[in-house]
Image: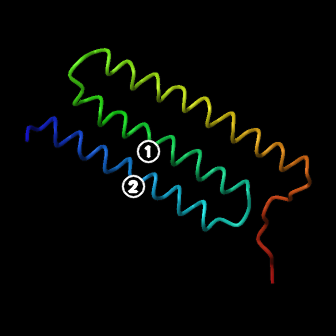
Amino acid sequence: MSAVDWLGAVLVVAGTAFFLAGTIGLLRFPDAYTRLHALSKADNLGLGLLVLGLAVTADRLIDLVHLLLIWLLVLVASATTAHLIARSARHRGVPPWTRSRN
């Protein structure tokens, strides 16, 4: 394995770790707003690292262009979807989580 392959593997593993962190945030956070934040931030960074890891090992320029286009489309779709879900929750009266004081 060359140094470029190792770099790609490290970036893919780091991206996977961010996906795992986003999933844990989805399961552990208390309300819809914080869950959306965990998913959108961690998954976008995780996908960016995955794309970067695959991009360094890409053989052709067209493969790199495809990876970047996919990443950009997912970024736009993720932000739009998170905004629409949060807006819908807000309109339905779902209150944001606040720490209760004892």
Provide the secondary structure element on which disc 2 rests. Answer: helix
**Which residue appears at 46% of the width and 52% of the height?**
19
Question: Which comes before the other along the chain, label 1 or label 2?
Answer: 2
Q: Kindly identify the amino acid type of the residue bearing the numbered disc 2.
A: Ala
Q: Residues within 10 Å of mark 2 (few under 14, many from 20)?
A: some
Q: Nearer the viewer, residue 65 or 99?
A: 65
**Which residue appears at 77% of the width and 46% of the height?**
86
Vertical order, 61 against 53 (above or below): above
Indicate left or right for 68 with 91 as reference: left
Vertical order, 42 against 76 (above or below): below
Q: Are marks 1 and 2 in contact (CB under 8 Å)?
A: yes
**Which residue appears at 20% of the width and 22% of the height?**
59
Give the quarter of the image for residue 5.
top left
The tag on residue 17 is 2
Vertical order, 80 against 92 (above or below): above
Residue 66 is situated, as x and y percent measured from the top left of the image, at 39, 21
Give the quarter of the image for residue 30.
bottom right
Q: Residue furthest bottom?
A: 102
Residue 24 is situated, as x and y percent measured from the top left of the image, at 53, 63
Q: Kindly identify the amino acid type of the residue bearing the numbered disc 1.
A: Gly
On the rendered image, what quadrant is the C terminus found in? bottom right
To which residue does mark 1 refer?
46
Residue 22 is situated, as x and y percent measured from the top left of the image, at 53, 55
The tag on residue 12 is none
